Image (cartoon, rainbow, N blue to C red):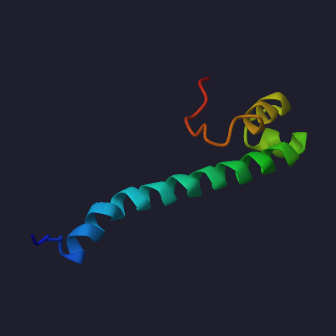
Amino acid sequence: MTTRSLPISLTDRATAPRSTAWIDWLRRVVHAVESRHHLAEMDRRMLSDIGLSRSEALEEARRAPWNLTPPRR
């Protein structure tokens, strides 16, 4: 009995989108964590420049890292 395998190019294409999507998602999570950390460190003047209150900034900073959907307003 012989087995046939797919050419390497086909197997790479089949796994590439899934692994790329995972890396892209992880990058977005890391970026969200960093951004939220910076928001928590901003003073009231800096927050007013971007149109946020201190309580809104702290609420955003407390969100789970994997929660990437925009908050409802």
Q: Point out the residue furthest to the bottom here.
A: 8
Q: Quick check: 57 above or below 22?
A: above
Kindly identify the residue that appears in the image at 71 percent across and 49 percent down. Answer: 33
| Closer to the camera in the image, 16 or 8 | 8
Q: Quick check: 36 above or below 1?
A: above
Provide residue 65's location: percent of width, then percent of height.
67, 43
* Count of numbered marks: 0
Q: Point out the residue furthest to the front here.
A: 1
Provide residue 35's location: percent of width, then percent of height.
71, 50
Quadrant of the frame with the C terminus: top right
Provide residue 69's location: percent of width, then percent of height.
55, 35
Q: Point out the residue furthest to the top here.
A: 73
Provide residue 39's location: percent of width, then percent of height.
79, 45
Quadrant of the frame with the N terminus: bottom left
Q: Is residue 4 left or right of residue 45?
A: left
Q: Point out the residue furthest to the left here.
A: 1
| Closer to the camera in the image, 25 or 51 | 25
Kindly identify the residue that appears in the image at 35 percent across and 64 percent down. Answer: 16
| Closer to the camera in the image, 39 or 68 | 68
Kindly identify the residue that appears in the image at 38 percent across and 56 percent down. Answer: 18
Kindly identify the residue that appears in the image at 80 percent across and 38 percent down. Answer: 48
Q: Quadrant of residue 12?
A: bottom left
